[in-house]
Image: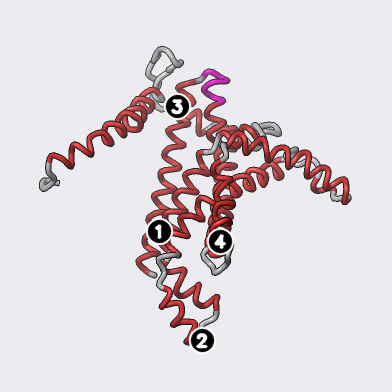
Amino acid sequence: MRTKDLSYWLFLTPVLFALMTVVVIPLGVGTYYSFTEWNGITTGDFVGFQNYINALQDQRFINSLWFTIKFSVASVILINIIGLSLALIVTSKIKTNNLLRTVFFMPNLIGGLILGFIWQFIFIRVFANIGQAFGIEAMQGWLATTTTGFWGLVILMSWQMSGYIMVIYIAYLQGVSKELIEAAHIDGASAWQRFRHIVFPLVAPAFTVSMFLTLSNTFKIYDQNLALTDGGPYNSTEMLAMEIYNTAFVQNSFAYAQSKAVIFFIVVAAITLVQVYFSKKREVQM
């Protein structure tokens, strides 16, 4: 760092200023407020860890946390499988690969609220009509139960993010040496063997990036949850971001909501750091 010249710091200063203003300072101030009786206007008395103790004993908060974890696990697996599959399709020798790239990426350009309302119409109206037409009872009443609401959210998130993750895999797949693949093909390696022993290890860094992005995004979603289920039925599909929002702006418990947000931050940071560590370690082993 001592060898960096003045121009380096001049270019870096706006970024550091933005990071401090938008992330570091609000995080510190919010953490301080979580130890008080802050009501959104005045700080109030200092209460120590009482807000955190109450949050960890709040069954609604725990249920939302557990639901968010289950949702994130299912979504991360599906998004990465679909994203990699789409990347393999559009990097193969087909004439419409450029068109397919555009089509697969387009859902990521649609806002979360609009996506939620679109899929709400599909799940409630389209699925119900198909179920009535073919006598499939399971397709009727979607989003009316916790299970269908859960999988509805997973489907929505997977449909939205798969195209974005596809782009990341495409970037790494295009860097795989074609000569290496052709050599393995000449030696008699099957398509699965070429993918498993050559392509997969070479695109391992893409898994690190994709897993990090999908984990952080699935944990933090709010607008899709609001538009699709609004936490129903009976708050059983209420994800953590929505539960914290409702605590602050519906119950007007700002300090209590801030303590939940700090716990949320710690959980997401811990999970993503562990994921990045093991993903990087696997890259080295490969």
The image position of residue 102, as x and y in percent, is: 55, 52
Of the two numbered discs 2 and 3 in the rendering, the one whose residue sits closer to the viewer: 2
Q: Which residue is mark 1?
A: 278
Lower sequence index among marks 3 and 1: 3
Q: Element at badge 2?
A: loop
Q: Is residue 154 above or below residue 208?
A: above
For disc 4, the marked residue is 97
Q: Nearer the viewer, mark 3 or mark 4?
A: 4
Query: Label 3 to label 4, Cα distance in Å?
Result: 47 Å
Residue ID at (49%, 26%): 257
Q: Is residue 213 left or right of residue 25?
A: right
- Marks 2 and 4, how far apart at CA: 27 Å
Give the labeled residue for mark 2. 188
At label 1, the amino acid type is Phe
Residue contact between numbered discs 3 and 1, judged by CB atoms under 8 Å: no
The residue beneath circle 3 is 258
Residue 144 location in percent, x, y? 75, 38
Task: Give the Cα distance between marks 2 and 3.
Answer: 59 Å
Q: Classify mark 4: residues with Cα within 10 Å, few (<14), some (14-19) or many (20+).
A: some
Q: Which residues are magenta?
A: 246-252
Q: Secondary structure at mark 4?
A: helix
Q: Is residue 160 above or below residue 232?
A: below
In the rendered structure, the answer to whether residue 275 lies left or right of residue 141 reads left
Counting residues from the start of the chain, the first of labels 1 and 4 encountered is 4
Give yes or no for residue 251 being in the magenta stretch: yes
